[in-house]
Amino acid sequence: MSAGTFELVGHSVLITVPGSDLDLDAVQLIAHQDVVPVVCGTEDEWVHDAFSGQIDDEWVWGRGALDIKNMLMAELEATEYLLSKGLRPRRTIYLAFGEDEEVHSHGAAAVASELAKRGARSAFLVDEGTTTLFDGSAYGAPGTMVSDICISQKGYLDIELYASGEGGHSSNPFGGTSLERVCRAAARISDNKPAPELGSIVARTFEALSPYITEAPFSELVGDVRGNARIIAREASRLRELYPFVCTTVAVDCLEGGSAAANVMPGNVRATINFRLLPGVTGLEVLARVKELIDGTGVDARIAHETPAGRIDSVEGAGYLQLKESLEHYHPNVVWVPSFVCGGTDSVRYEEVCGSILRVCPFRPAPEEESRGVHGVNERISRRAYAQGIRVLVRLLENTAFSGGF
């Protein structure tokens, strides 16, 4: 705090550590303060109280230990470690911590707006992304440990289907019920999902892995990834691990308004379908396709909520090679590839004020800890994995903000 300024933007936090060369674009590290709640009824299943922050000889326990208080605290610790050595950054460092990423991301949007008003500009930004090291078997590269640096993220889109109904006795359902019409419309959408496609980012993923891919079907295709894009996308869509990377996904999730009794026809009925949009796909494009599919069903469709997909940044952009080098230094036997985040992050809100947006968690918890702990019971991170993440961020800051390099 003594090296910079601390500000609240709503309930979000902006810390500015000024650099010695104000002509250089800044470096920005972000995370979100908020966490998901503890599911009611599971409180007694926690070894330690979910909000105790208990630390023992091996673990840091508590809600947010993996999503994403670990990132927030590590960014602070890495910056403070370098400042405590008497060093001063050449590039200004912004530490920005949103308040509601798990809901609407209004906090990050407010911080980004404030930075834009000030004319602030960052060369690159680091936010949360993937965490696990995984075997490359799904890509046809068994025995190769893989992880990714994400240079975009999928869009989020909720489309609401609506059919009006007057209720009445079910002995005369002439023309069908409102619930029937909504179900037919949802079925048409589900039965006509967008075709798989190999976007530029996933094409780069396959190109980066091509020296390690030894098994069919991809071993026979990666010699010309772009030329075989359609076939690669089709084959990838058949694998659970790769499916969301080549498809705009469709999930029929919510239905409201059904009758409480079997002999009473429902009134107004709504269904919500969640789409996760591949980078480059827009919500209006999807809505137009939905309306085309449900034409004639008597059902209306509208966009209920949308967060556009992130822009596609370059692997030659500021910070990418330095981040890759920092990760490779501490994980030398891992192949790091470009990819995108299938969920959402706050980082998309900063596109106007940031040259390159990079999404990766520098921590590497055991896969079973991540799968069980993120949003689950007994969320925790090992002290070893947490410390290693801090080391990655220290090295990144040394080679960018404090050196002024790249």
Image (cartoon, helix red, strand yellow):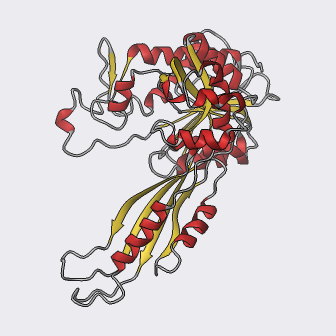
Front-most of 86 and 96? Answer: 96
- For the question of whether residue 345 can be seen, the reply is no
> As displayed, is residue 249 above or below residue 266?
above
Using the image, determine if residue 212 lies above or below residue 340: above
Residue occupying the point 60% across, 34% down: 339
Q: Residue 231, percent across and down?
A: 62, 41
Identify which residue is drawn at 48% across, 64% down: 189
Q: Give the number of marks.
A: 0
Query: Which residue is drawn at the image coordinates 72% and 32% (left, top)?
Result: 224
139 and 307: which is toward the camera? 139
Q: Is residue 70 left or right of residue 171?
A: right
Horizontal and vertical percent position of residue 56: 29, 15
Q: Quadrant of the C terminus?
A: top right
The x and y percentages for residue 353 are 71, 42
Query: Residue 110 location, x and y as percent?
Result: 59, 49
Residue 380 quadrant? top left
Quarter of the rendering containing residue 34: top left
Residue 325 seen: yes
Position above or below: 37 against 386: below
Q: Is residue 124 left or right of residue 74?
A: right
